[in-house]
Image (cartoon, grey):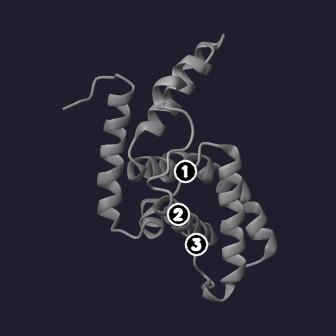
Amino acid sequence: MSREQVVELIPALRAFARILCPQPENADDLVQETLIKAIANLNQYTEGTRLKSWLFTIMRNTFNTRYRKREREVIGLPPDSVNTLVTQPDQEWSARAKEVYSALMRLPDQYREILVLIVIQGESYEDAAVICDCAVGTIKSRLNRARQRLKEELGEAVED
């Protein structure tokens, strides 16, 4: 693993972090903490494995550890007040993008994570299974359920 390889993956790490942490400052902190842990644990990296998957796994574990620590802590505004702070965009596509993002953020963590890894980041089922530490079949099932839940959140008809 070279420094250049890690630097090339920072945009992907940031994108994944923004899904886990909607606030940019928290996402940047998560990326930084991930990189610090990766550097500190270079001896645990096995040459020949996908560096991106290894870093995503570190990020996911770091996020889960943080989440458990602050599970009972309420941060930010109550969900009801968020809608009153939003101004309507001028462009239809911008409004739809916000709807999709909001619907994505309302999904349970495991569904949101799978959608981001596979649909947005383009990870394979196999790599997502390694990152999430579960079977490929579980990934496929979660992805299917995540897509259905996202459609429901968007108010679209779900096929039976």
Image mark count: 3
Residue 154 percent across, percent down from the top left: 39, 25
Asked if labels 2 and 1 touch by Cβ distance under 8 angstroms, the answer is: yes
Q: Which quarter of the figure is the C terminus placed in? A: top left
Q: Which mark is residue 54?
A: 3
Give coordinates of residue 77: x percent, y percent: 55, 33
Which corner quadrant of the image does residue 40 belong to? Answer: bottom right
* Relative to 115, 48 lies left or right: right
Q: Is residue 89 above or below residue 30?
A: above
Mark in the foreground, 3 or 2: 2
State the residue position of label 1: 20
Which residue is at a point 58% across and 72% down the rendered structure image?
54
Instruction: Determine the CA span between mark 3 and mark 1.
Output: 17 Å
Residue occupying the point 65% across, 83% down: 41
Tell me the amino acid under the disc marked 1: Leu
Residue of label 2: 60
